[in-house]
Structures are given as C-alpha cells and as structure tokens.
Amino acid sequence: MAGARNKGEGYFDEAYWNNRYARDPAPFDWYQRYGEISPLIKMYIKTTDRILMVGCGSALLSEEMAKDGYQRIMNVDISDILIKFLIDKYKHMPQLQYKTMDVRCMKEFKDGEFSSVLDKGMLDNLMCGSSAQACAASMLSEVHRVLKPGGIYMLVSYGDPRGRMAYLRTKYLPWASIKLHAIPRPGSKRAYPPRKITDVIEMQRDLSKGPWCNVEEPDLHYVYICSKLDPKAKEKTPELPKSSKLAIFKKSMLEAQNKILYNKYNSE
Ligand SMILES: C[S@@+](CC[C@H](N)C(=O)[O-])C[C@H]1O[C@@H](n2cnc3c(N)ncnc32)[C@H](O)[C@@H]1O
C-alpha cells in the first residue's frame, strides 16, 4: 500500500474499491500469504474460534484458513461488488460468511461476539487517508467492542511500532497486552538475524531501537497481537520493563487504570 497512491486520494473510499473489484475480482493477497503467517495464526487463534476478518478483500487468506480447519470466519468488506462475488464463489464453503460492512461502524455485531479479529491491511488502508486518526480510532474501538474479553486482535501491517503503537496503546483501548512479531516481506533479500516468526520481539520503551523495530527497516511486515483485557484472568502487560521498582509500580498503575476503563467501557 505504501507509495501506491498519494495520501488522501481515496484509498479508504468505497467507490475506489468497488471500481477496482469490478475491474478485477481475481484473488490477491496484500503483504503475506497464509503459508507465511500460518504459524502465528495457529499460535493465537483456535480453529473453533469465531473469527472476524476485517477488510477481507479478494485475499485467499480466509479460504486457506478454512481448508486448514478453521470453522467459522465472518468476512466483511466495504465493497458490495466484491462481497456479492465472494458469496457466490464460496457458497460451497459454509465455514465462510460474508457481509458488506464499514469497519468503522459494525452495528450488526454484538459486543463480545468474536474470539478473534484478523486484520491484514485494513487499518493500514484507513491510515492512508486524510482523516486517518479519526478513521483508525473508530475502527479500533469497534474491533475492541466486538471482541470478547480475552479475545485477540491480530494486525498484520507494514507499519513499525513507532507508527502503530500510538493508535493501538491508548487509554480508550484497554488491551491487556500488545505483543509484536515481525516477518520479512516476500522476496526480501536482506539477511535478518535468525529468528522465527513466532518469536515475540521485545519492544523498546521509546519504540525506536532494536534491530527489528527500526523505522529504517523497509523489508519487514509487523504483526501486532492485542489481547482484550479479561478482568477474570490475571493478565500481564509484558511490553513494560520488569526490572526496576518504578517499572513495577507503573505496571500496577496501568493494570488498575485498565480495570477502571474496562468497567467504564462496559457500563456505557
Ligand atoms: C489493502 S486491502 C486488504 C485486503 C485483504 N485483507 C488482504 O490481505 O489482501 C483493504 C481492503 O479493505 C477494504 N476496505 C476499505 N475501507 C473499508 C472500510 N471502511 N470498511 C470495510 N472494508 C474496507 C477494501 O475494500 C479492501 O478490500
């Protein structure tokens, strides 16, 4: 997505996507194919989970997940032309459901309806537009709402932590934890330190250092795993340093704040 169009030129625009899919509905996966990211999907998402795929596009991801045992995937996209095409294409696969929907307002879904939300390129798409901040905030609050406590939002993005964490880690979205993984882009010739996609990358506090969290690292895709706070579970916030007394104090403050926000969020 990066560099393909100018900022604000209608990337999140329904007409743009409808035109594009009317011209060419052939399968196309942005960033990564299922084969590459399946170890992470299997690590965090159970085959029995009710999954929401936001901005599904014409990617083969849902089909390949279903063929690999995932039983319930609800796919949404803003393009009604695409969704009509996919409903017909996948009528023989009851594991896959489709709805035309704007991810910024998913009123048709109840609070806590999904165990997992999968996002490959959807948030990035909204962030290419001129009202990026407002669009991203609306989408993320809807994603958070439809997730059940303890549920997972998996974001596959070209954006490194400096560009994404400010959107993900806000006081309005009380995630229990946000974990980071990275994966070389397809065709990347760069040599990276030997690391498995399933290895969690420890984020630096200033989000700028570290060989895998560097802004000047164009050959990587990042996968953020945001876990929705479950007041009944004893969740940790692993992105904070654990060693110093100050860090432990800050961590307990953050957890207390998360609980208050969670209760407030659920009573509104
Ligand atoms: C970059 S593509 C990613 C497609 C697919 N997830 C993939 O990995 O190949 C972004 C998709 O989001 C859809 N989209 C854009 N804005 C949307 C919105 N507000 N609500 C729902 N879908 C949207 C587009 O129609 C497009 O299919």
Image: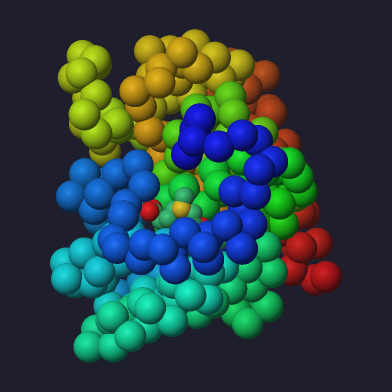
Task: Work out whether residue 257 or residue 26 is closer to the camera in this orientation and state it.
Answer: 26
For the C terminus, give its image quadrant: bottom right
Using the rendered view, name the quadrant where residue 100 is placed. Answer: bottom right
Q: Position of residue 97 (x, y in %)?
A: 39, 81
Q: How is the image coloured?
A: rainbow
Q: Is residue 72 above or below residue 171?
A: below
Disc tally is: 0
- Asked whether residue 255 is in view, the answer is no
Image coordinates for residue 210, horizontal then vertical, percent: 43, 13
In terms of depth relative to the viewer, which is nearer, 24 or 126? Answer: 24
Q: Identify the residue at image location x=65%, y=49%.
A: 10
**Res. 16 in view:** yes
Q: Residue at x 50, y 17 (%)?
A: 215
Does 186 sit above or below residue 176?
above
Please report the residue visible at 64 percent of the width from the left and 73 percent of the height from the top: 106
Task: Please tell me whether residue 112 is drawn above or below residue 155 in the rendered image.
Answer: below
Question: Residue 74 placed where, x, y %?
Answer: 43, 75
Q: Pick the residue in front: 197 or 252.
A: 197
Residue 261 placed where, x, y %? 76, 54
Looking at the rendering, which quadrant does residue 103 occupy? Answer: bottom right
Up/down of 27 relative to 51, above or below? above
Q: Is 92 left, or right, of 132 in this rendering?
A: left
Q: Is residue 63 left or right of residue 257?
A: left
> In this view, which residue lies farthest toward the front?
23
Determine the residue positioned at 56% across, 68% down. 78
